[in-house]
Image (cartoon, rainbow, N blue to C red):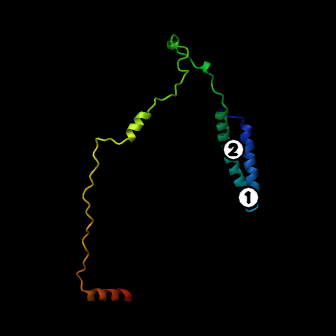
Amino acid sequence: MLFGSLRMNLWSGAVGFVLTFLLSLNSNLLVTSLIRGLIASAVWFLLAFAVRFALGILTRPEKPASVYPQSDSNAGQGKGLGSHLDLTTPDEGGDLNDLLKPKPDSEPLQPADFKPLNPPKLVTSKDPEELAKAVRHLTDK
C-alpha cells in the first residue's frame, strides 16, 4: 500500500536535517542547531510516510470486473441488464405554465384598514427649574 521504499523516508529526513541545520546555524548555537535539525529530520521522516501512503493509494490499480464474483441468480436474465442509462426526463412545461398563471377563482386579499402608529407622548412632570439645576450640577463635574 506504500509507494516506494524506506529509502525515500531516510532521504527526506536527511534533507530536512540539512536544511534546518544550515538555516538555523546563523542565528543559533551549534548545539541548538543540531537539536533543531534532529527534530526536523524526524518530522520530515514521518511526513514522508504520509506522502508515500497517499501516493500508494493514488497509484494503486483498480481491480478489473472479472475479479469480482458473479451471482448465478441473474445469469438467466437479460445480458445487457444495467448497461443502459436513460437520462431523459418527462416534459413538465405545461405544469410550470399552470403554476405561473393566476387563478381566476381566488379573491384578492383585502388589506386591513391602515391605522398609523400613535405612541404615547413622553411628558416630564418635573419643574423646569429643577431640570435646569440638575443640568448645571452635571456640567460642573
Q: 66 above or below 1?
A: above
Question: Disc 2 to disc 1, how far (Cα)?
Answer: 19 Å
Label 2 is placed on what type of residue? Phe
Crowd class of label 2 (few under 14; some 14 to 19; many from 20; radius 10 Å): many
Task: State the residue in front, 82 or 109.
Answer: 109
For the N terminus, the image quarter is top right
In x, y percent, where is residue 9?
71, 41
Marking on residue 24: 1
Pointer 2: what residue? Answer: 45
- Asked whether residue 30 appears in the rendered view, the answer is no
Label 1 is placed on what type of residue? Ser
Left or right of 71, for residue 11: right
Number of on-image labels: 2
In x, y percent, where is residue 41?
71, 48
Q: Quadrant of residue 51?
A: top right
Task: State the residue in front, 17 or 100.
Answer: 100
